[in-house]
Structures are given as C-alpha cells and as structure tokens.
Image (cartoon, grey):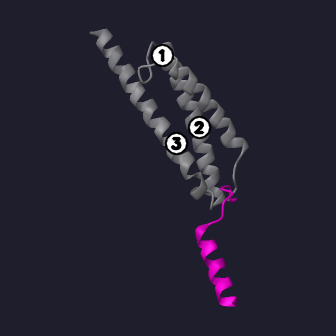
Amino acid sequence: MPLRIGHQMLELAETVISWSCGTIVVIWISIGTLARSIRLEHIAHNTVTLLCFLTAAGLIVFDRLGGEFWDSEPLANFLALMLVILGVVGQIIPIRGEEIQGEPNPHHLMKARKARESEE
C-alpha cells in the first residue's frame, strides 16, 4: 500500500510540474502583450522567473525520488536546466515595451500605402 501511495504522489507531482511548465510557456508567449505596461511586464518577468526556479527545483526533487517525467529519465534534469536558463534570461533581457519582432506591422503598411495613394 505505501508503494501505491508513493506512486500516486509522483503522478500528482508530474501533473503539477507539467501545469507549471505550461503556465510558464503561456506567460512567456504573452510577454509582448504584457510589455505594453512596464508594471505588468515586471510582474510577468518576475512571475516567470519564480515559476522557472520553483519548477526546476521540483523537477530535480522529482528526479531524485525516482520519477520519470513524461516517461523519460533524463528529461527532468534537462528541463530543470532549461528552466533555470529561461529564468535568468527573463531577468536579464526585459523588452520594456519595445518592438522586438523586427518586421513591419500590417496596419502601418496599410496606412502608409493609403497615404501614398492619396498623395498621387
């Protein structure tokens, strides 16, 4: 019976860690939108960093307890390393509301084209 409870706890930990990774991805993807407000951007960066470090620690403990993350033994440690790197990078490289795509906005292109047509 104790073995079954231990296995269930590892499954619960894997589920929580998976959700945490998903939350990190969603926040990271949303950074561009959240960066319109400096305050929201700081909150998002700090949240991502905190979640990255907590999830990395959880993955390391999970691995040491014998868990297999997504049925792969080495994946937990690799993801922990990636999360630590992502957490550090998230604090080093804030975008501060800057345009980072490097490509023109379609709305700006349309306005520029209409302005050229009206000048002709």
The amino acid type of the residue labelled 3 equals: Val
Mark 1–mark 2 Cα distance, whole angstroms, equals 24 Å
Q: Position of residue 71 (x, y in %)?
A: 41, 20
**Element carrying mark 3:** helix
Single out the residue that lies furthest toward the front. 120
Identify the residue under disc 1: 73
Residue 9 located left or right of residue 77: left
The amino acid type of the residue labelled 1 equals: Glu
Q: Residue at x 55, y 27 (%)?
A: 79
**Element carrying mark 1:** loop
The amino acid type of the residue labelled 2 equals: Leu
Q: Position of residue 59 (x, y in %)?
A: 51, 24
Identify the residue under disc 2: 50
Main SS type for the magenta part? helix
Which label was assigned to residue 90?
none
Measured along the vertical axis of the image, is residue 34 above or below residue 61? below
Q: Quadrant of residue 33?
A: bottom right
Q: Residue at x 65, y 86 (%)?
A: 117
* Precedes in sequence: disc 3 or disc 2: 3
Q: Which residues are magenta?
A: 98-120
Instruction: Find out whether residue 59 is within the magenta segment.
Output: no
Circle 1 packing at 10 Å, graded few (<14), some (14-19), many (20+), is few
Quarter of the C terminus within the rendering: bottom right
**Element carrying mark 2:** helix
Identify the residue under disc 3: 25
